[in-house]
Amino acid sequence: MRVLIVIDPSYNLSWVNRLKKELELSDIEVSVLHKQVNGKKLNHSVFKSIIDLFDKIFNTIPAWNFNLKQNLEEVENQHSSPDLILNLTEPSISKSLNALYKATVLDVFANKMPLFHPLVGINTIAKESKNIFIQLRITTANRQEFYQVASLPFKHSWGNIKSRIFSRSIVLILRYIKGFPKLSDLQISSFHPINRISLQTKIQTLFVLFKSNLKRLIYRQQWFLSLTNKSTGDTTFVRKKNHVLADPFPIKRGDKTYVFLEEMKFGDAYGHISYFEVNNNSSFETKKVISENFHLSYPNLIEIKNNLFIVPESFYQGIRFYKCVNFPNVWKLDKVIFEDKLCCDTNIFHFENRWWLMTTMVDYTFAPHCDDLYLFYCEDINVDNWTAHPQNPVVSGSDNSRNAGKVYIKNGRLFRPSQYCVDRYGKAYKINEIILLNENDYREETVKIVNPKNGNIGTHTYNESEEFILEDHLNFQARWK
């Protein structure tokens, strides 16, 4: 396959080179066609001064006046005719490119703004929304198709947003070219590109940046837990001063319920795994049980042949199994799988004579780590011969991919909690019913979305025990408290 990337020299060439390298690793022939815009080089350092923000150059997308037939001759003289054109110039020329080159044309947008626009992503900040939607527009001789996927940056900064836009765009482009099996799930009817940034949007951007930075100086975010008694409906909140408590996973032993969780003291570099007991006289005092020189969270509890394991998120350290030696205090590392992968919030469960592993995994080194759910299966978990599901990633988008608790069975139906990261990380969670799960197909449908309550700004974990419903919640805490 031959791909032609059409850009102007002022574009983000480092991003284009990363895309080119990934394509070439897949034995795809890549050509890059550089074009000037009216002989001028666009300025990407928009915020180097406030004056630049209001400069006329950012009010319009420059006109593309180059001769398409001349470009066709240049390409044919240097390279073979392309099978696909990635148009990183003015979107209005895509149909002309298709007609002249007889090739499919792919345009990329971020929140409806063309990817090459100098202010791409700025409308995300102006709306006080950190969520990004990457759109693809496919132009062929007969029709146009549109696809969209959500992505989420973790910092409310334009630099972070642009970095996420470029990274997520590469992933989506590669999947389209390689034939992503679940691409149809991302298809939308259409959208109208945004070609201008208004003065109001620029002013709103400056105001939002000022307000968000001021808020960070005064407050910090704190996660805490809640336990709701299923019989009485009473809710107890578990907080610890100057600590993060999140990702509660319960287990019943005798007449006691134990809750394992992520705990991190403000100022520490990494979180660790702790637990507390729940009983009539419980003080919810946490005790540390697993710590490493890297971050640990999401302590999923799994029983395998009468042995109990904690499989926490360890991010860059693969998927680690800690075996219980003396419950609940002593755990020993037993094995590590997927050591070369970045995996987040892993669920492992047994269903219909197979073990299933669900994790948010990065398939490219630069890809967002909150956007794609991967599925694997095996018959013997002790052998660890995991087979990747042919529809991977089985779920895409930061609005539904990342796990938010154990997969569970209720009234004979299989459910998966997932994080709903629209506008912010951990904003809410969804409950999804798994409709179809086998070695060839995966389907789920969202049953409900649970938003934060009581003035909280986030919730991203849901688990149940025999007696309790456990959730975590996010709110602001004044830095002087």
Image: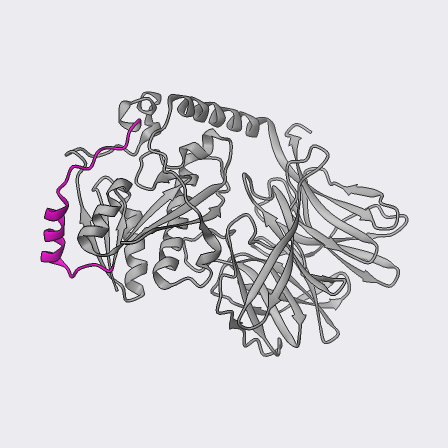
Q: Relative to 159, is 280 above or below?
A: below
Furthest residue toward front:
142
Q: Relative to 76, is 481 above or below?
A: above
Q: Is residue 73 magenta?
A: yes
Q: Relative to 221, is 70 above or below?
A: below
- Magenta part of the chain: 59-83
- Would you identify the image quadrant in which residue 452 lies? top right
- Quarter the C terminus occupies: top right
Query: Percent position (x, y) of residue 437?
Result: 60, 68
The residue at 33%/22% (across/down) is 54
Query: Percent position (x, y) of residue 296?
Result: 61, 54
The residue at 56%/45% (across/down) is 421
Query: Percent position (x, y) of residue 223?
Result: 67, 41
- Would you identify the image quadrant in which residue 253 lies? bottom right
- Quarter the N terminus occupies: bottom left
The residue at 81%/43% (across/down) is 236
Q: Relative to 269, is 403 above or below?
A: below
Of residues 125 and 336, the one nearer the viewer is 125
Q: Is residue 86 magenta?
A: no
The residue at 30%/40% (across/down) is 116
Query: Percent position (x, y) of residue 47?
Result: 35, 28
Of residues 438 and 338, the one nearer the viewer is 438
Q: Is residue 35 left or right of residue 270?
A: left
